[in-house]
Image (cartoon, grey):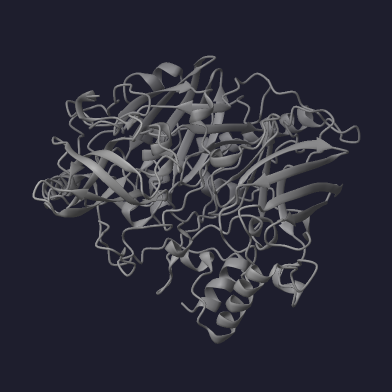
Amino acid sequence: MRVKQALQGFGLIAAAAITAIAWCGPVLAQAQIQEEAKWPPPGVSFYGDPGVPDVSGLWLGTITGVPGVPFAPNRGSADGRPATYYAPWPLPYSPKYQAIVDARSAASKQGKALGDINAKCLPFGLPLMLVSKVYPDEIVQTPGQVTLFMYNTNPVMIWTDGRPHPSDLKPSYNGHSIGYWVGNTLFVDTVGLVPNTTIDSGRDPHSGQLHIRWSIQKVGPDILHMHVTLYDEDAFKEPVTTTNIWHRKTDPKWQVLDDASCWENNESKTDSVPAGGFFKF
Amino acid sequence: MPACGEPADRAASGWRNLATALLTLGLFVGAGAAGIPAVAQTAALSIPIVLPPEKLSWHGDSAAPDISGVWVRVDSAAAAGVRKEGWLPWAPPLKPAFAKIWHDRVAMQAAGTRKDDPVQSCMPPGMPRFDTGMNTPMLIIQTPGRVMLYRDGIPVRRIWLDGRPLPEGKNLESFSNGTANGHYEGGDLVTKVAGVRDQPIDSTGIPHSNDLVIAERFHRVDAQTLRVEVVLTDRTAYTKPMKAVVTYRASDNPLWEPHEFLCTPGEGSHPEIYVH
Amino acid sequence: MSKKFLATAFLVAAVIGCGDITPALAHHSFAMFDKAKEVELKNAAVVDWQWTSPHTWLYVVVPMPDGRSERFSIEGGNPGLMRRQGFAKGSIAPGDKITVYMSPLISGKPGGSINAIRLGNGTLLGERLNGAH
């Protein structure tokens, strides 16, 4: 089963190598993570340790895009900040996945969006919801669990109670996330993603082997640094990484209050044609 | 850090559990050194999976009850019999225009022609069905300032505890879960919900108007039991309030996780019927 | 699936797998619009303003230079996005006269994507192309 292969292939995280620098700086070569790694480092507490920082609150990151390609008005980051990007760029796709990227790019030029799962009312899922923010996330921190509530998609639950990834994990749009704290940083391991989620606003793909290692680092009372590294031996020739800076938002206008449903008034329901000469598209 | 308000009868076992956790972790990690993938290890070890400390609720209010955790419904919604989801009085006390809507829906349901149950169209069940019409486990997360309630695949409910008033007039939008605030009172969580989208309150199709206000009382009966009372008041649609009670027991699965629920609308579903 | 099954499944909380069955799609993306252009629709009479997901929709009737009227169907973002740009459910009502600034459909059909709307009282909701006022 793919998840098991992914775990066997990547092993567990190298405990000694896990420092803030290793996460934020140079990308781990894939060979490194195949060594016997221990999850998590010894002596680290899973629980709502009183020593860990409080990352709860409403946080807004930036959108993740393509270097050099600006966003149209009202389509970029919700607070006007510049987009962030993956490195290395261009994304180091394997030939098989580069072909998918090329096909999507060609289709876009003709006005079609291949791989647009959201148009089918499927959840955005991960990694997109971690790295490309147009809405704020609400982070809620309780013993054993850190939960990200996001607009219009299922919450991401990071289990910090010591449980492992289930052996019978069924791939899903959010995958399965477990985490532990070191100092001011929550380190998270996510596996079990369906292959049709995307990694950025350009709908760049990944495979079912994707293994995300990411962290939430509280660098100040109102700033989180999200460091995300994608390990995917099928899709990428080397891991790719991005950092997204999340700002705390306190103005009520940012509060996620909507519980909208994608099916409420979906233009894909072609059997409900608006009256009076109007149309949906 | 949030203040942890624990009821007096709860043992402070957090640190003991932590020590257990670290001991288990050491063994866990030791097995990892043998190169066995993590998932296989759990099965091989006879050490039980480490549980989190007894549920500490970071509700920030020492007088607040702890209603956090995973709750499983004691009786199924269907077991309420004719009164489908337990609403009383039955038949529902509807004013004439609304009674007609209901009777039409009941007739269409019986004839197999009803098209306007939003749940069939993959719309969220909304309130009060979130409380009274569901059998999935309910996760309650209590934090200072708000309580979140979550069930698989349904938009999370937020109950604001920070004293904010409900919006009024055209600022009160229609959401499937409405907008809710609440406070702790007499050991219970008491809430008020308004601005509920035009969707039936149950599977039989009982309607409501824009004036619907929902009041809930979450009462922790004992360590294993939570009772939720739901009262509907609607001066435009109902001649008297309607009430239902749902009883939950604490889940015995410490490793419960939500399931992903993806819905595809059936043929001939028309969620846009509810677009006003 | 029959309706009864769906109803039961809902109440009995089945674990339902990834729904890959997709309806025939009148599928869309931002690639449908000419984002480099902005079309101005003056004296647009509002027929409907749908404050819904996944998109808000504005239906207007616009007097054209040749004397006839054209019906335009214009799509906006979902309410969460629109709210932050200043829109609200009650911003626009049938019968209002507004000016619409939109990125037109590449296909040439009378429709597009909302950039901004100027209400009768002069208030601008949203953001025009290149930040014009």
Q: Residue furthest left?
A: C66
Residue A203 seen in the figure:
no
Q: Residue furthest bottom?
A: B111
For this view, does A277 lie left or right of residue A215? left
Q: Is residue B113 above or below residue A45?
A: below
> Foreground residue, A104 or B204?
B204
Q: Quadrant of the N terminus of chain A?
A: bottom left
> Foreground residue, B152 or A81?
A81
- Seen at 77% across and 30% down, the residue is B14
**In the image, residue B38 lies at what x, y percent?**
52, 43
- Seen at 46% across and 53% down, the residue is A261
Q: Residue furthest right?
A: B9
**In the image, residue C37 lies at what x, y percent?**
13, 36
Q: Is residue B214 above or below residue A15?
A: below
- Seen at 43% across and 54% down, the residue is A171
Residue C32 seen in the figure:
yes
Residue A9, by quadrant, is top left
- Seen at 74% across and 77% down, the residue is B82
**In the image, residue A15 lies at what x, y percent?**
48, 26
Q: Is residue C105 above or below residue C81?
A: below
**In the image, residue B81 lies at what x, y percent?**
75, 76
Residue C116, by quadrant, is top left
Number of marks drawn: 0
For this view, does C45 lie left or right of residue A8? left
Q: Residue furthest front?
A: C67
Q: Quadrant of the C terminus of chain A?
A: bottom left
> Foreground residue, B6 or B201?
B201
For this view, does B132 lie left or right of residue A255? right
